[in-house]
Each structure stands twice: as C-alpha cells, then as structure tokens.
Amino acid sequence: MFVDTHCHLDSYERHSNEPLDVFFARLSHDADKNVQPPEAYIHVACDPADFERAQELSERYPNVYAAYGIHPEYVLIETAQDEARLVEFLKHPKCVACGEFGLDYHYDLEHRNQQVVLFERHLQIALASQKPLVLHLREADNDALAVLRNADLSGRKIHIHCFTGTPEFCEQLLDLGSKNADIFVGFTGIVTFKNAQNVRDAAALVPMDQMLLETDSPYMAPVPYRGKPCHSGYIPYIAKALAQVKQIPVEQLYRDCRENTKRCYGI
Ligand SMILES: [Zn+2]
C-alpha cells in the first residue's frame, strides 16, 4: 500500500540496536496497530563508506532498493575517488536514484562556496546517470535555486526530500516544473510536529500528483514517537497528518503517493 521512499536502514540498525531481520519480521505484528510494514524501501546511502552495505541490502532483500549520493556534510573530505565509485554504484540494477546530495547551511555556513561547487558537480554526475535525483536542501534556498535554475533539468525526475523549508521555497521549487522537470516533494514525521506549521503550509501547496511519503529513518520520528529512532513502519502517522492537511481521505493519499512513487522511481 505504501513505499518508504527515503530511509537509512543501516543507520536505523545502528541507532536502535535492532538487527534488520528482526525489524522486518516484527513490523507486520507490532503492538501499535498503526505501525505497518511498507511494501518496499528506498534505502539511501549518502556516505561513500556505506555504498557496499547498501548494495548488499538491495541484493539480499527483494523489496529494498538503493540510492547512492554524497551528502553535503562531507564537503571537506569527499574525494575524486569517492565520486568515481559513486558513478559505478549508480549502475547497479537495483539502484533507483542518485542522492541524496545538495546544500545544507544549517550546520555549516562557513563552507558555502565549497558546498555550491560540490552540488554543481554532483548534479552533473546525477544527470549523467539518467536516474532520478534525490535532493537535500536545507537553509540554502537562494543558492539551491540558482544552481537548479542554471541546470538542464528537462525530463528529469527530482525528489526534494524531507521538506523543511517555507511555503515560498516550496512554491519556487515547484516552479522548476516549468523547466520541464518532474518535481516531487517528500514529507517526513516533521508534519506531525506541533511547531512545524510552515511545513504543513508547504504541504498544502503541493499538488497530490507530486507528493511522496518518506520517513528519513532513523531521524524525524513522527508524534507520538518523536525523539525515538524512526523507522519505516511509522509512515501511517505521516500519511494521516498529510491527509488532514490536504483534507482528503487517507486512502486517497496512499493511492496518490503510491502512484507518484511509481512515476518517480519506477517501483
Ligand atoms: Zn536522508
């Protein structure tokens, strides 16, 4: 019924101390009946050190797909060799996207210029791979828009992941559709946070054929699990909150997001 379009299964395992086999097995009969197993997982490896494990997971579990990218937090340590490996991993048959990559000024205002240079380079790698793009854009609105407006995104599928920005930024990203790009916006457990009205206001602006469900597990657990390790079984809490924002039945939200997942990722 739903796919978690963005999670970090290996980090969940590390954070929760729950081996993945145990986790997968218990999801379908969790004590909380709102917790449901996804049909599939898009596992995101954004540290080059984790690429091998991601590939192993995608080969071992039929419903685990992988995305490979280099997170902006590695701006000072990533190497040309990392980028060459990234290009190779992107060719794997169970790789469904390139990402996450992008800009993050929340923790690092100091290296903005380096981040922009890296973002531009990773964007070229992603475009060359012909795969959908998974973008991490945090508190870097103007620079992100400048890079994206300058790129040839025609015919490309782009998942703006874990949206946390303002409604205005959301609108500007949706406008990239006028460059013939297929823009999707992903929402996490943040939509259930009391203090996240801006994110709900942004979600209200996203057309139902451009919305994606994701957890960003093990981060951003929805209420009532806020602060605990987040996992993909919590998607129903996110779906319910989004359905409320959109004022539609949750079944319709699931249907639309499932359809969007297929259009964006081919699964
Ligand atoms: Zn992520």
Image (tube, helix red, strand yellow):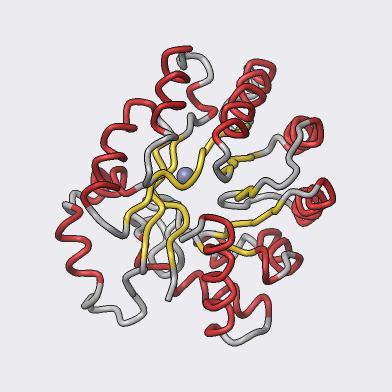
* Residue drawn at x 58%, y 40% as measured from the top left: 136
Q: In this orientation, does residue 61 appear?
A: yes
Place of residue 184 in the rendered image (x, y in percent of width and height, measured from the top left): 65, 56
Tell me the quarter of the picture where residue 252 sits: bottom right
Location of residue 41 in the rendering, given as x and y in whole percent from the top left corner: 37, 57
Q: Is residue 145 left or right of residue 86?
A: right
Quarter residue 63 falls in: bottom left
Residue 158's spot in the image, x, y percent?
Answer: 64, 48
Q: Is residue 80 left or right of residue 65?
A: right
Of residues 227 and 82, the one drawn nearer to the viewer in this rendering? 82
Tell me what residue is drawn at x 53 percent, y 64 percent.
262
- Is any part of residue 99 visible from this angle? no
Asked whether 167 or 128 is in front, the reply is 128
The quadrant the N terminus occupies is bottom left
- Left or right of residue 237: residue 178: right
Residue sitting at 72 percent across and 64 percent down?
206
Query: Does residue 213 sit above or below 48 in this rendering?
Result: below
